[in-house]
Image (cartoon, rainbow, N blue to C red):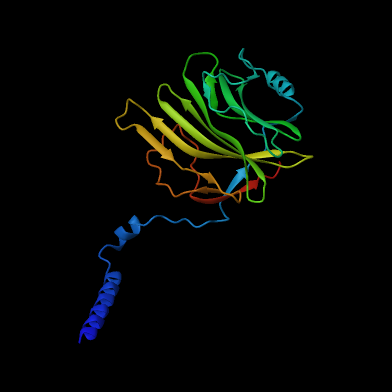
Amino acid sequence: MRAASILALISWSAAACSRIERDDPDPAARAAAAPAVVPASRSLTLDLMPPDVGPLPSLAALQRWAEARGGNDAPRIFDPRPSWVTGPARLARPRGPFRSARVVGLDNQGDFIDCALVLETDAGFFLFDGPVCENSMNDDPYAFRVEQLEVRALRGGQPVLVFRSTASELYPWTSEHTWLRVCIAHSAPTGQPACASILAARHFADDSVPGGDLRWDFAPRLLPDGSVEVPPHPPIIDWPLSMLDEPPAAGRHALVPVPPG
């Protein structure tokens, strides 16, 4: 008698659970509560772009190239000033084909200074242009923060340079743009580097507008196989017009070299 009662209780419990699964009172709410899953996709790519300048045999040659472009009276290319560039402005531990990497101030032929990235490989020195980080003609406040500058080894041992930085314009509003730059370089004798620049985060604050502080963080990360993963993120609402860069699509992105020409 007792065994029959236990068997009946088990049968009732299974039937009740089956009924709850079939007659979910709010399947939409349950689906919304579940974490979003974005499958890896080979159709998502990030372009590896060639350098703007290079190869050149030395930093002095790069300086001469910058001076030949003309511009205002600001220095043409120089080490960044500690007053407006923070973080590791030089690569601490060179590895593989990356002999050195550094952030430099570059006069962009006007009133503004760019924070550019200079890579040295087996083939020489290469320059990748960067965002505005200083004004050479007035006191408008800018800031440039290097959050990561290091060489990491992918699965299989291929060295990859990872460069994460934030450029800020602090007047008349706060506008911060964070990029993750991933660079590869071929081994000798070519040593040609190429980099993919990925929008990683945005912050826009307008004190004159109630609720005008807006933040987005797309949190891209480099995976051991050399791809870049971007987790699911909410849709962009009220994207400021001054922020024209598009955020990366959620999913796994392969790094694809852009063919020359």
Q: Position of residue 174 (x, y in %)?
A: 41, 26
**Residue 119 shows in this picture:** no
Residue displayed at 34% across by 31% down: 212
> What residue is at 31 percent from the left and 60 percent from the top?
30
Left or right: 45 as drawn, with respect to 2: right
Position of the N terminus, as image quadrant, is: bottom left
Q: Position of residue 52 (x, y in %)?
A: 67, 32
For residue 217, side relative to residue 22 (left or right): right
At x 74% / y 25%, what residue is drawn? 58
- Residues 143 and 152: in front is 152
Tell me the residue at 60%/36% (across/down). Answer: 150
Tell me which corner region of the image, top left, top right, bottom left or bottom right, holds residue 32: bottom left
Does residue 10 lie above or below 36 as drawn?
A: below
Is 97 located above or below residue 43 in the figure? Answer: above
- Residue furthest right in the image: 189
Does residue 243 appear in the picture of this structure?
A: yes
Task: Name the foreground residue: 134 vs 188.
Answer: 188
Give the x, y percent position of residue 144.
52, 26
Quadrant occupied by the C terminus: top right
Percent across and percent down for residue 252 are: 54, 52
